[in-house]
Amino acid sequence: MHINQVDSSTFFADGNYLEYPFALTFYYTRNFLQQVNQCATAASPFNETHWSDDAFTAKANKARTIVDDGTRREMIRELQRQLYDDGGYIIWASPTRSTRTRIT
C-alpha cells in the first residue's frame, strides 16, 4: 500500500477535496456519532471515502435518540464494528500513528 500524504492546503484546495476517488483525514476531536454524521453517510458533507449504507445510517440515527448510556454504548459499539468491517476507512486510526512497515 502506498499513501500519498499531502499538506492540508493541497488536500482541501478547490477542485481537490471530495474529488479524490478515495481519501481520508483523521478527526480525533469528535465523538463517534458526530463523526458518523459528518463523514459516514450519504448525506454527510465530508464523506471522503464515499461509503454509505442505509441500514448503518438508520442505526446511527436511532443511536442518537437513546437516552440510556449502556444501551447507546452497545449500539455505538455495533456501529463501530460495522464501520470497521464494511466502511470506507482502510486505516482505522491516524496514518501518522502506523507502525506497519508495509505502509509508506
Image: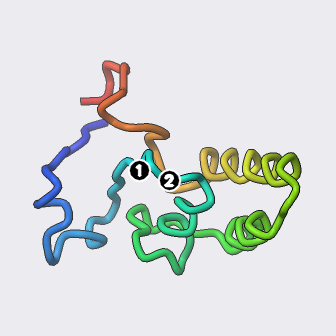
Q: Tell me the tag on residue 27.
A: 1
Coloring scheme of the render? rainbow
Camera-side mark, 1 or 2: 2
Instruction: Give the crowd class for mark 1: few <14, some 14-19, many >=20 residues within 10 Å.
Output: few
Relative side of 62 to 36, left or right? right
**Residue 37 location (% of width, % of height):** 56, 69
Q: Tell me the amino acid under the disc marked 2.
A: Arg
Which residue is label 2 attached to? 30
**Residue 68 location (% of width, % of height):** 88, 55
Which residue lies at the image location 14% right of the left edge and 69% below the top edge? 13
Which residue lies at the image location 81% right of the left edge and 54% below the top edge? 72
Relative side of 71 to 97, left or right? right
Mark pair 1, 2: CA separation: 7 Å
Which residue lies at the image location 53% right of the left edge and 65% below the top edge? 40
Relative depth, front residue between 41 and 51:
41
Q: Quadrant of residue 61?
A: bottom right
Q: Quadrant of the C terminus?
A: top left
Relative depth, front residue between 91 and 31:
31
Relative depth, front residue between 76 and 16:
76
In this view, 2 is above or below 33: above
Relative depth, front residue between 33 and 84:
33
Residue lying at the far bottom of the rendered structure: 43
Q: Quadrant of the N terminus?
A: top left
Relative side of 49 to 68, left or right? left
Q: Does the residue at mark 1 contact the one at mark 2 (Cβ under 8 Å)?
A: yes
Instruction: Give the crowd class for mark 2: few <14, some 14-19, many >=20 residues within 10 Å.
Output: few
In this view, 58 is above or below 83: below
Q: Tell me the tag on residue 58.
A: none
Kindly state the secondary structure of the residue where label 1 is placed.
Answer: loop
Which residue lies at the image location 27% right of the left edge and 65% below the top edge? 20
Q: Tell me the amino acid under the disc marked 1.
A: Tyr
